Image: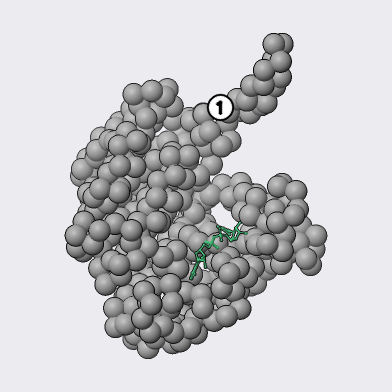
Amino acid sequence: MPTLKFAVLAGDYIGPEVMTEALRVLEAVARLDQLRLEYTAAEVGGAAIDRHGVALPDSTIKTCAAADAILFGSVGGPKWEKLPPNQQPERAALLPLRKHFTLFANIRPGLLYPELADASPLKSSRIPNGIDIVCIRELTGGLYFGQPKTTTTLPDGDIQAVDTMVYRKSEIERIVATAIIAARARRQKLCSVDKANVLETSVLWRRTVTDYCAKHAPDLALSHMYVDNAAMQLARDPNQFDVFVTENMFGDILSDEMAVICGSLGMLSSASLGAGRNSHALPFGLYEPAGGTAPDIAGKNLANPCAQILSAALMLRYSFGQERSAARIEAAVRRAVVAGTRTADIAFGGASVGTRQMTDAILAQLA
Ligand code: NAD
């Protein structure tokens, strides 16, 4: 019986609420598919600040390092907003985790069931079949990390700030390799998004993607698009994409646009994969909902657990190679929602259920 060893970092506000539900679903799938779950909870974010004084205690890193994956909730909220920026839960927990485990590949499914088309700000005539695309964002390079990064006062008294966009060919190749795996599992279509008409890093990006795919993935239909056009095309006809891959900042912006057109944050999952291999010879990864801690609805049994549950499915797929169990969870969530069980965020003013009841409906659909 395969043993799935993961760390559970629930975080703050709705984080623990939706994490409890994701673990219920994982336990049920484990029973059905003969998997042994071995998970350890650790504190992160505001909860860790309250208990240990820091958002990411060493003990939490140790728990993660001893595991093959991290199931993450979300961190932050008004309680810790007055802390200096570098001690804020999100910045002081997530960024160091990404760095420590070299989580370079962020996979964000943009999924909207046709039955939920009203949740999208796009006209339903533009998305008759809902939305089903995947954004792959490079997460550890580019403008956010390049050096130098400075602010200086010039001799004439003016102030100048500098950020630096840097990419190495090897960094581009490893994110393209991830994109190829994702594209092969879907419709064999990959679009690379850059700004090669202006940026040197994008010229290298485009050349590297072209060469790498020609050599390693001639079976895929590869296309290229400038990022400004991609932003428009996402709003015009999102399903023209299948998998798109892009650098860090472009991906930050496009993945948020994608989240908006997909309607509720409560439905969107994400995976951040590392460069190393875990004890299953698969990527170590951190799996989390796309949304935050939703302090406005915390503690009211209102949070939609689907994003956390779908993130657990991604963990089964990418870090544990349990495709059948992952697909089982995804199908159960879909069936529960299509059958009409909805939390308030996806009920459009109609009848809605609470966090726990939503999970009960998903559990009922599992087998
Ligand atoms: P948010 O995503 O928490 O909430 C935005 C809106 O979406 C709210 O109305 C919320 O109720 C709703 N929402 C989000 N998730 C939902 C769910 N599962 N079910 C139903 N509705 C849901 O964003 P915010 O309000 O800007 O941020 C709140 C806190 O979360 C902040 O402290 C922020 O820093 C933090 N945050 C953390 C992460 C993370 O841990 N990765 C990500 C984003 C924001």
Q: In which quarter of the image is residue 30?
A: bottom left
Ligand 1 image position (quadrant): bottom right
Q: Quadrant of the C terminus?
A: bottom left
> Which sits in the foreground, 313 or 63?
313
User: Is any atom of residue 69 visible in this view?
Assistant: no
* Residue 305 in picture, x, y percent from top left: 48, 75
Quadrant of the image occupied by residue 108: bottom left
Residue 271: x %, y % from top left: 46, 58
Residue 338 drawn above or below residue 256: below
Whether residue 359 is visible? yes
Residue farthest along the top direction in this orientation: 155
Check the image and report above or below for 330 versus 45: below
The residue indicated by pointer 1 is: 164
Amino acid type at image mark 1: Thr
Q: Does the residue labelled 1 lie within 8 Å of ligand 1?
A: no
Dot 1 crowding, Cα within 10 Å, few <14, some 14–19, many 20+: some
Say left or right for 185 vs 13: left
